Image (cartoon, rainbow, N blue to C red):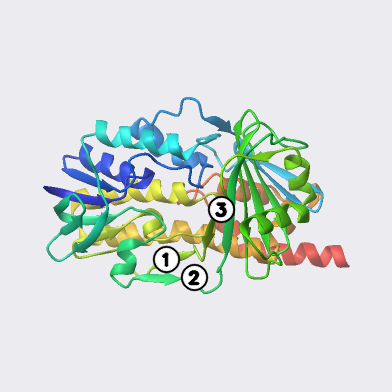
């Protein structure tokens, strides 16, 4: 089978890219190894991804609406509402069960004219545009890896670069009987700080939630997945108050050393998009947003078949991800929470606008200056606040 594009992976990034390309007149084949998507992590959407949802007509029926995020540390908490962003266009997103969400994206791709081949990729020859699969060879003018954080093609081409600082691990599951308390509003994601890490609680409604813990090398938790998960809950009264009556309903799943990027996102005959190009720590739920926005702009560059357009796409893609990456560093030094929990009289308006705009994912609109200003100044602001507190 020969197509204009073969995309490796039919997750949200691949399906969005395929839909844009097919609607632009290209023939597209997506190769996917799993016919029925699994309940993977990455369930919390950001409002600024909605431009892709709306343009491609994704059905969001039944997903829990998300209006904001709550951050907790040592009994203190702060809630950020997306309506407080800098000139917000979208003021809500959704919490999604990925096994449902991903199937809906496949429906978008197929209805747009894409073909999905369920098979396992066994090899690729980029020079000839050939992708070897268990169902036979596929050929294309360009091969794009949209297959997620395994970064299969990036590794095959020797492009994957591990992050030198964020060598983190994670353990996640789903639970039933989860409470929302205090500042929580229905649909809010809750992030609870622990030494050297953090806990996520992503509600789906009816007391069901995705729950997990991310641990840096400085985190004291050791042992099995269950030991580390239970230990994290014991370290966080904020999480325990929400989870003490909950029961686990799925097995634990672990990830290791997941933050990585690629030395280039495109070359002769290939491109990388979404987590297959770069994956950063998920504390701000940026993964799906980066993948969808990256797919939208990559499709435009590919349809124009311009090397300069691809270079501009990669530069813009890296810059948007880089805003999140800067603030993630501030998260692990404690700067983010120092600014977020500052007394109201010390929070200048652009503090809050910058944080909320970042949490909403507004990193690809050059007219939005507050997320970048906050990313650049967060360490300075946190230092000033700590100095005042200790004076």
Kindly identify the residue that appears in the image at 67 percent across and 70 percent down: 218
Quarter occupied by residue 171: bottom right
Q: Is residue 275 left or right of residue 2?
A: right
View extreme (top): residue = 61
Q: Point out the frontmost of discs 2 and 3.
A: 2
Query: Which residue is rendered at x = 14% and y = 66% of the image?
Result: 127
Q: How far apart are marks 1 and 3 (CA)?
A: 22 Å
Quick one: SS at disc 1?
strand
Q: Cα distance, mark 2 to mark 3?
A: 23 Å
Q: Do the residues labelled 2 and 3 touch (CB within 8 Å)?
A: no
SS under mark 2: loop
Q: Mark 2 points at which residue?
A: 163
Choose the circle earlier in sequence order: 1 or 3. Answer: 1
Kindly identify which numbered label has been placed on residue 371: 3
Q: Which of the 4 quarters of the picture holds residue 133?
A: bottom left
User: Is 342 left or right of 111, judged from the image as shown?
Assistant: right
> Few, some or many C-alpha atoms within 10 Å of disc 3 (few <14, some 14-19, many ≥20)?
many
Q: Residue at x 34, y 60 (%)?
A: 314
* Residue at mark 1: 261
Q: Find residue 213 and report its image quarter.
A: bottom right
User: How far from the left and from the top, in percent, is residue 48?
Assistant: 48, 41
**Residue 138 at x, y = what percent?**
15, 52
* Image-based side of 334 in relation to 15, left or right: right
Q: Where is residue 184 in the image (x, y as percent from the top left)?
A: 71, 36
Badge number at residue 4: none
**Residue 227 x %, y %:** 68, 58
User: Is disc 2 in contact with disc 1, using a CB cutoff of under 8 Å?
Assistant: yes
Among all residues in the image, which is located at the extreme right? 391
Q: Nearer the viewer, mark 1 or mark 3?
A: 1
């Amino acid at each position: 089978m020969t197509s204009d594009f073969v995309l490796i992976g039919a997750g949200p990034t691949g399906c969005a890219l395929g839909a844009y390309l097919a609607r632009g007149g290209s023939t597209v084949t997506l190769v996917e190894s799993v016919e029925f998507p699994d309940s993977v992590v990455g369930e919390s959407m950001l409002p600024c991804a909605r431009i892709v949802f709306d343009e491609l007509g994704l059905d969001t029926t039944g997903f829990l609406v998300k209006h904001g995020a709550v951050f907790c540390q040592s009994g203190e908490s702060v809630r950020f509402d997306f309506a407080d962003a800098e000139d917000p266009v979208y003021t809500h997103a959704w919490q999604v069960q990925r096994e449902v969400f991903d199937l809906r994206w496949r429906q978008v791709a197929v209805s747009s004219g894409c073909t999905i081949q369920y098979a396992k990729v066994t090899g690729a020859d980029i020079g000839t545009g050939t992708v070897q699969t268990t169902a036979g060879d596929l050929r294309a003018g360009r091969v794009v890896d949209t297959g997620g954080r395994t970064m299969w093609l990036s590794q095959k081409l020797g492009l994957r670069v591990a992050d030198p600082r964020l060598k983190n691990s994670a353990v996640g599951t789903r639970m039933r009987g989860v409470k929302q308390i205090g500042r929580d509003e229905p649909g809010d994601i809750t992030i609870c700080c622990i030494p050297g890490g953090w806990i996520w609680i992503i509600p789906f409604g009816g007391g069901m939630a995705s729950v997990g813990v991310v641990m840096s090398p400085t985190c004291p938790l050791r042992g099995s997945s269950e030991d580390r998960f239970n230990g994290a809950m014991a370290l966080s009264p904020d999480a325990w108050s929400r989870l003490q009556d909950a029961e686990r309903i799925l097995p634990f799943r672990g990830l290791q050393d997941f933050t990585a990027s690629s030395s280039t996102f495109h070359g002769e005959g290939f491109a990388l998009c979404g987590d297959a190009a770069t994956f950063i720590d998920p504390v701000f739920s940026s993964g799906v947003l980066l993948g969808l926005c990256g797919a939208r702009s990559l499709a435009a560059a590919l349809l124009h078949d311009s090397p300069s357009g691809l270079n501009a796409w990669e530069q813009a893609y890296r810059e948007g991800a880089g805003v999140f990456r800067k603030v993630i560093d501030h998260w692990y030094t404690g700067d983010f929470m120092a600014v977020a929990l500052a007394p109201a009289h010390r929070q200048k308006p652009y503090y809050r606008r910058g944080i909320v705009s970042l949490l909403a994912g507004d990193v690809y609109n050059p007219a939005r200056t507050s997320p970048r200003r906050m990313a650049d100044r967060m360490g300075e602001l946190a230092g000033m606040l700590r100095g005042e507190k200790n004076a």
